[in-house]
Amino acid sequence: MNNEDNQSDRRKFLKYGFLAAGLTVVGGGLQKVLSQDKDKDAGKKVKVMTTDGKVIEVDDAHCKAAQSCCSPATPEGARQGIPGKKFVMVIDLSRCGHELKCQHSCQRYHHLSGMNVWLKVFKMQEGEHTAPYWMPKPCMHCDKPPCVKVCPVSATFKREDGIVLVDNTRCIGCRFCMAACPYSTRSFNWEEPQLLNETTGVVYSPETGFPQKKGTVEKCDFCPDMLKQGKLPHCVTACPNGVFFMGDLNEDTVSNGAETVRFSKLIKDKGGYRLNEILGTEPSVYYLPAVKRLFPFQDPLPGESNEDKEKKG
Amino acid sequence: MENKERKELTETEAIDLLHELNEDMLPKKFGIVGNSWTALLVIMLLTGIYCYINQIRNGLSITGMRDFVFWGIYISNFVFFVAISLVGSLITAVLYLLKVEWRAPLSRISEVIAVSAIVFAGLIIIVDMGRPDRMINMALHGRIQSPIIWDVMVVSTYMTLSFLLLYFPLLPGIAFCRDRLKGIPKWQHKMYQILSLGWKYSPQQYAVVKKAITILSIIIIPVALCIHTVTSWLFASTYRPGWDSTNFGAYFVSGAFLVGSGGVVAGMYILRQFNPSYKKYLTDMHFDKMGRLLALLALVYAYFSINEYLIPAYKMKGEEAGHLNELFTGYYAPMFWSVQFFGMVLPILVLMFKKGRKPLPMFIMAVFVIVGAWFKRYLIVIPTMSFLPVQEIPEAWKHYSPTFQEWAITGGSLAGALLLITLFVRFFPIISVWEVAEEKGVSHDIIYTHLHEGNEK
C-alpha cells in the first residue's frame, strides 16, 4: 500500500474513466446522426380531414397515430372503459328456445375454435318438481369480481363501464381466475388456437379477444368493440326471439334490437334476479324468470346438442 | 422435554468417539446400489424434462386437464412438495428450540429433504403455468391482493431460510470433508474449499453458527406455518364446495407435519440399509421416538380431517352433498377410504405399540403415510372440480385422467427431488458430526481443540 501503487491506481481510474465518458459521447453522437433520417421528413406534409369535413395539411412529423373511438383498443387502452356507461344485460328466459344462434354468432365473430365456447346454453331444472328451462350463460361481469381479486398479474381487470376483460398479452396461464369464478364462465387455450384466415395481420386487442393466444384464459367480453360504436353485442342481434337485452344502467335503458325498455321497469314487472346473488359477486347480468313462455320446453332433438355434434366429429 | 444432565465423557472417550464419528460420517463413493439408484433417478428426470419441452411447444393440451378440471396432478404434486418441506422446520427448528436431544442425527436429513422438496415445489408450479415465459409479470405487475403472490413470497422466503438452516450447521462438516477426505478428484476438493468459507473450527466460529441457527430456527417456524397455510388458501379463497372451508389452513399444516415426518423416517431407514455404520447413530431409540411423534401427528391430522368431513357430511348442503357423495360412495370412494385407512388410521394403530415402532414396521408405515399423503392431495384438488353437473361437453372432459406425459413430468419432479437428496448424501455428511458429538456428551472444548489440532496436519 505505498504511494506509487496509489498513483498508478489513480491513473488507471482516470484513464478508464475518460475512455468510458468519451465512448458515451461518441455513442450518443452516433445515435443522433443515425436518427437524423427522421428529421429529413420535417418538411413533408400530409393531408388530413377534420371531423367537420375540412381538408387541411399538417407536418408529418407532428402526426401521431391516435386511437380511433371505433377501433379496438390496445392492451393499455383497453383498461379505460367507455366513459359514462355502466353496461348491464337482461336475459329473458321465457323466450329462449335453444336455437343457439347467439352461441354460433359469438363463436364466429370471435373466431373461436370448437371447444372454447364463451356463451353456453344450459338446460336448468332446480328441483325435482320445478320446471326445466333453457338458460344462456355469458360472463356476469360482476361488480365484485372474484376473478379480478385473485389474478396475480392484473391480467383480468374491471373497467369503469363495468366490463371485465382479459389482457392476453399479460396472462401467465395460472388459471386461478377459473378456480375463483363461481359461474364457471372462463375457458383456457390448452393448445395453439386454430385461427381462421381472417385474423392474419390483426393486432391483438383485449376488446376483441382475438387472435387468441396459447396458454391464456378467455371469456365473454360483452363485445366492447361493438359497444364502442353504439352497436349491440353479437349474441343480442343474433337471437331470433329477442332473449338478450343490453343497455346502460346510467340511462336505465336496455334494448334487444327490436324493443327498447326501461331497465328498472322491466326488472320490477317481470321479477328479474341474478345468479348466485347470495355470494355477493353482484353480477351485471339479470335474468327474467321462465314464465308465460314463448314456446314450451323441449329437449334438443338427437344430433342437435353440442355434445352430439362433438361425437359426430 | 427437560434438558437432561448430559453425561460428560472423559477426554480419551471423547476423542475416540470423535474419531469414530469422523470415519463413519465422511461421505463415501457409491457402490452398485448407489449408482443404479442415481442412474434411475436421472433417467426419470430426463424423461420428465423431455416431456416438459413437449409441453412448452404444444401447450398444456398434452395433459389430461381441460376447462372443467383445469388443475391436476401438477398442482396436487405442488401441494405435496410444500407439505413435505415443512419437516425441516419441525425437526431442525422446533425440536432444536425445545432442546430435544435425540433430534441431533436427524436434523440434517430432514433439512435436506425440506430443501429438495421446496425447490421442486417451485419448479413444478412453473410447469403448471400456461405462459411460463411471462413469469416476470409477477414481479412487474404483481398484485399484492392475490394469494398466488403471497405464495410466491412465502415460498421464496422459506426456501432461503431452509437453505441457510441447512448450510450453516453444515459448515463444520464441509470443513471435515475438505481436510479429511482422501483420494477425491480435484474439483471435489475445490468445492469443499469454497463452500467451507474458511472454517477453522474455532470456538468463535462455532458460537456464530449456533447463534445463527437459533435465530433462523425462531424465524423459520412462523414462515413454515405460513407456506402451507397460504398454499391452502389457493383453494380456500374460492367458492367451490370442498375448497370453501375455514378449516383448510390448520388441516393442511397438520397434514404437512405428518407427511414430512414420514419422509424423515423413510430416509432414516434407507440410509441405514445403504450404510450399516449409520445404525450406531440412527438407533432403535430414534425410531421409537419418531414413531411416537408420527403417531401424535397422525392423531392431530385425524382431528382436523374429522372436522373437514364430518360436519359438512352432517349437513349435506346442496353442492357439498354432491362432492361428499363422490368421495364417500362415488367415483373417488376407493381412493378416499384407502387413503384414510392406510395413510392415517393404520399408522396410528401400529405406532401405538412398542413393537410397531421398530425400524421395519416404522418404514412400512412411513411409506404408507407418504403414498397416502400424495393421493390425499389428489383428492383435495381434483374431485371438487369434477363432480359439478356439466352439460354439452365432450365425454373426455367429464373425468380427469392424467396423461402419460403428465405422469412423466410429475414423476420427473419427484425423481429430481430424490436426486438432490442422493447427491447430497454422496458429497456431504448426512449426519451432523458436531451436533451428534454434543448430544453424546463430548464437551465443546474437546470438539474445538481436538478437531482443530487433528486438522492442522
Image (cartoon, coloured by chain):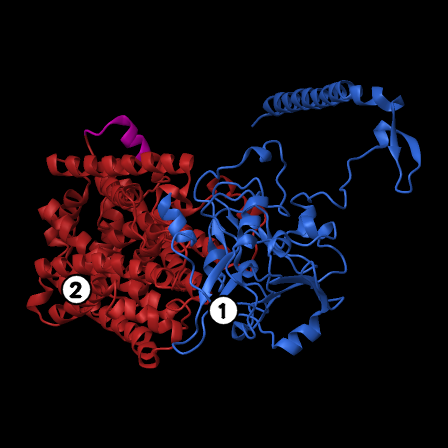
Image-based side of B54 in relation to B361, left or right = right
Span of residues in magenta: B183-191
Q: Which percent across, then down, holds residue B8?
A: 18, 62
Q: Residue at x 84, y 21 (%)?
A: A41
Image-based side of B327 in relation to A288, left or right = left
Subunit ID for the residue under disc 2: B
* Residue found at the very far front of the displayed protein: A295
Q: Residue at x 54, y 36 (%)?
A: A196
Q: Is residue B252 magenta?
A: no
Q: Which is nearer the eye, B273 or A189?
A: A189
Callout 1, which amino acid? Pro
Q: Which is nearer the eye, B62 or B112?
A: B62
Q: Is residue B186 magenta?
A: yes
Asked if disc 1 and disc 2 are in contact, CB closer than 8 Å, the reply is: no
Please determine whether, in this image, residue B167 is positioned above or below residue A236. Answer: above
The secondary structure that most of the magenta stretch takes on is helix
Q: Which is nearer the eye, A138 or A217?
A: A138
Whole-number angstrom distance, CA of label 1 to CA of label 2: 54 Å
Determine whether the residue tagged by mark 2 lies in a helix, strand or loop: helix
Q: Residue at x 22, y 39 (%)?
A: B41
Give residue A296's mark. Answer: 1
Q: Colour of chain B?
A: red
Q: Which residue is mark 2?
A: B342
